[in-house]
Amino acid sequence: MKKASRVFYITFALVILTVLFGVFAPEIFEKVTGNIRAFIGTNFGWYYLTLMALLLILVFVIVVSPYGKIRLGKDSDRPEFSTLSWISMLFSAGMGIGLVFYGASEPLSHFAIQPATAEAGTDAAFKEGLERTYYHWGIHVWAMYGLIALSLAFFQFRKGEPALISSTLKPIFGKKMEGPLGTLVDVLAVFATVFGVATSLGFGAVQINGGLTYLFGAPDEPWFQLLIIAIVTILFVISAWSGLNKGIKYLSNTNMVLAVILLILVLVLGPTLLILNLFTETFGHYLQNLISLSFQSAPLDAENRSWLNDWTIFYWAWWISWAPFVSMFIARVSKGRTIREFLIGVVLVPTLFGSFWFAAFGSTAINTQKSGIDLTGFPTEQTLFAMFSEMPLGFIMSLFAILLVSTFFITSADSATFVLGMQSTNGSLLPSNQIKVLWGIAQSLVAAILLSVGGLTAVQNTIIAAALPFSVVMILMVIALFKALDAEVKLAKPKK
């Protein structure tokens, strides 16, 4: 393959070996990866909590500092995409399917099944469930994505470096990043991306299947999920072929329109006043308790510590494993913006929209549960559709949700193929269609194969394990970024 780098061949081989392990020894695969995940959760929980909190603090420092005036590109460069298209693209890549999959089910779980500290089924659990969901999907996640994306965008567009994770470490390691050490960093990033997105595609296929089963009695079988993956693969390969300015841009804008329409329908047809009042109070409480939440590790409370391992620490590792993909895509579409504008947009807008989304869907689900309809009896992928069935226009909203999951499915996979193409062609900002299509098909095959052997949990565990070494890379990226920003500011100061 003409433009493929050694990162492509090494990672492709590792992906094949991992999939074969999952196919031929699924029980051993799940046991080994489960043990690794448990070890990381128990022994490195404090580390993940501290890291995510510090990254949030550093974002604030950069926004209010002179660094915020620096432009991601030449001083004459201006944004390539409109603000609305830009936000739509970063949002579709960053959250995508997860918003629809967990929108109703996570707050409901925190209320009725497994609350953090409150008693299940109480008003305290209702409020706490929403606050913890904002925490898991909110400002910490986007601060982490924003800071890593900033590092990538700064070195790509301001310094003219290749669009590679390894390129951001040159201020620390210099030319060593062009050798085996750099290859190792990039292989780790690509590996995490492939399995992170494959898991998301698996979830997307399961939820589309769940909706079609609930609404039309479609077969809830692995072969039907494979058919869904095959159809969506054809669609996102077409989109990937059409390029960044057409396929991904238009689909991302479509995503946002569909998401806003569905959100408005839930707000208007659901318990409107309850949603607005609960969002106002719980989001305020979330902001008020941001510091204590950020560092809560429950060292003397075994039950609460177990909850943190299952939810918060799992989420922090999960988001870190997604950082190579999401941050690289955010960086790619952000040329021409100032650092201050970039960070405010990346951190605040998705946090506010996502939190209101969970307030609307979570409050409606919990209110339905309290009315006597047991939504917890449904599989996670059907919770949303069961909630809609108790609302006016429920059938139409369910169809909307299936369509939204499908378009999120396509944009997530589409964005990932673009990023994988960049990472495996020496950082090309316009990777060849051949490479993109090959990665797109590979992602879908990984999702399909592991779904058919019930290996999605093991894959989740695998990328949680991959997140630990990548978190060290993240720390080095941040150190290198501050070093480079400091040099940039000193260079810009007029000499006396």
Image: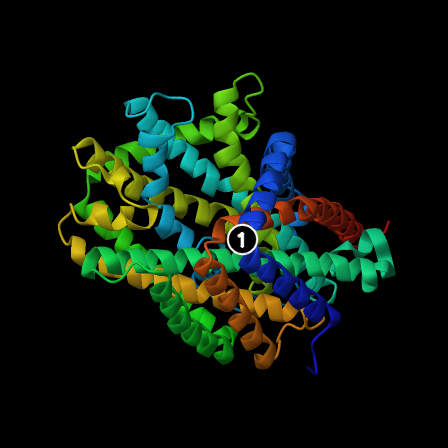
For the question of whether residue 50 can be seen, the reply is no
Q: Find residue 182 and report its horizontal and vertical position in percent.
A: 78, 60
Query: In the rendered view of the protein, which quadrant contains the N terminus?
Result: bottom right
Q: Find residue 269 and report its horizontal and vertical position in percent.
A: 17, 47
Residue visible at 54% across and 55% down in the picture: 196
Asked which secondary structure carries label 1, the reply is helix
How many numbered marks does the figure carry? 1
Residue visible at 51% across and 30% down in the picture: 308
Q: Please identify the quarter of the rendering in which residue 63 is found.
A: top right
For the question of whether residue 487 can be seen, the reply is yes
Q: Residues within 10 Å of mark 1 (few under 14, many from 20)?
A: some
Q: Please identify the quarter of the rendering in which residue 371 is found.
A: top left
Q: Find residue 147 and report its horizontal and vertical position in percent.
A: 62, 48
Q: Find residue 172 and report its horizontal and vertical position in percent.
A: 83, 51
Q: Amino acid at mark 1?
A: Pro
User: Given the current orientation, which residue lies at the most extreme left position?
Assistant: 392
Judge left or right: residue 373 versus residue 410: left
Q: Which residue is mark 1?
A: 26
Judge left or right: residue 77 versus residue 103: right
Toward the viewer: 303 or 326?
303
Toward the viewer: 427 or 339?
427
Toward the viewer: 287 or 453?
453
Judge left or right: residue 121 versus residue 72: left
Residue visible at 31% across and 60% down in the picture: 209
Toward the viewer: 191 or 146?
191
